[in-house]
Amino acid sequence: MKKKLRIGCGAGFSGDRLEPALILTQHGNLDYLVLECLAERTIALAQKRKQQDPNAGYDILLERRIEGLLPLLIQHGTRLITNMGAANPISGAKKILEIAQGLRLKIKVAVVLGDDVFHHIQGTELSLEGNRALTSYGKLISANAYLGVDTIIPALKTDADIILTGRVADPSLFLAPMVYEFGWDPENADLMGKGTVIGHLMECAGQITGGYFADPVTKPVPNMDILGHPIVEVSQDGLGLISKVEGTGGLINSQTAKEQLLYEVLDPEKYYTPDVIADFRSVRFEEVTTNQIKVSGGSGKSKPETLKVSVGYEAGWIGEGEISYAGANAVERAKLAGEIIKKRIGHHFEEFRIDYIGQSSLHGESLSYGSSPYEIRLRIAGKSNEKSMAQLVGEEVEALYTNGPAGGGGARKYLHEVIGVVSILLNRNQIQPSIQVFES
């Protein structure tokens, strides 16, 4: 049984940079590398890709990440835990084996299943966000429950090199190796709370090393072009020491840690996860040396009886169009263009907005009053259940070239299918997780 455990976080979302994970694996002396790549909307989009192709639905960067990482993981004896399986972890595992075979490497991949609970959904359940029946939002396309450490630990027991999951709670990806390696009792809410604090601090990767935190005037962060991602060294009693690889950019101090601790937290006394209801009120940070902080404190109460489920639904289409105006009276010409489009098609859309980028697109007209920039980019967007109607927005904006005010240029048009996400709670006894193991 280990007395200390080193865990690195190489990605905090699906589109995160590739190289921090490589640097962590090569220079971080890690026991585990975690890649957290799954947000609420990400898995709904992955389910959509799986519907179109039964072999798709795992993370779109899985192949590129694994191709670079696999030789390093084997060389350094680092186990990988990641939710890059998204909506199709079985296909993701097969793709990893294919890559391993191409690199002539022997690996074992354990896949965690059970988060897909779409067949449990009736459609009459009321959403947490709007207290409305699920079917009132649109055609349902996915339902994924947030699983916890109890589903990951059996996968760790297989000695697999890679643990590939779908939807699990982000802190659980980090808490699972602590419980497994230290032999923690999952019913010990105090230790589970401490481990969840550490997992929550780590889950967004570069955010605790200065990414998102940075403001060049009030909170400068050095060398963000080579931002390092965090490593935590955890001891058996739940204390954590967070640092980064020497020579990488970024900043780790009490400020970055406090901002990350409160990130996406509604009630610091009751942070719900599948493993524990964590209490952050007693968390303390101590700056040990430059870019190294000690984390202590945190506690918790017994795990909840229900699990959060993210439900994806088809929410229509958004059409967008943009065009620029510059020079004298740029604002007035852009506003005339916006009024023209609104009169022509605005009444056809359930949601319709006009933004003047450079003047009022971020904070509205009231806070922008009196400003007069040299150039303005007009952006118009409309949401509709009909694809052809949404498409019309960009076409109308493009037509402003010759049918609108003088001097419009750089027109662009876009069309996006919208996937909506709402949440419900499901009794955890209805969920039956399992694992499958694959070897190259």
Image (spheres, grey):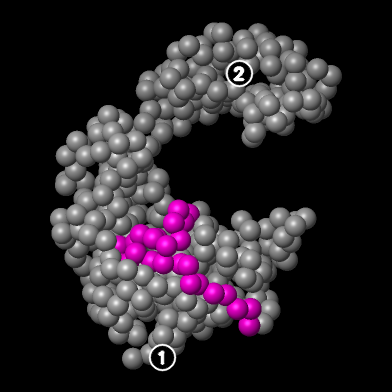
- Numbered disc 2: secondary structure: helix
Spot occupied by residue 377 in the image (x, y as percentages of width and height): 69, 27
Q: Is residue 16 visible?
A: yes
Spot occupied by residue 185 in the image (x, y as percentages of width and height): 27, 80
**Residue nearer the viewer, 303 or 5:** 303
- Look at the magenta stretch and give its main secondary structure: loop
- Front: mark 1 or 2: 1
- Numbered disc 1: secondary structure: loop
Residue at the spot of label 1: 3
Q: What mark, if any, has residue 398 been given in the picture?
A: 2
Residue depicted at 20% across the width and 63% down the height: 433
Q: Is residue 53 visible?
A: no
Spot occupied by residue 10 in the image (x, y as percentages of width and height): 50, 67
Amino acid on which disc 1 is placed? Lys
Q: What mark, if any, has residue 239 been given in the picture?
A: none
Amino acid on which disc 2 is placed? Glu
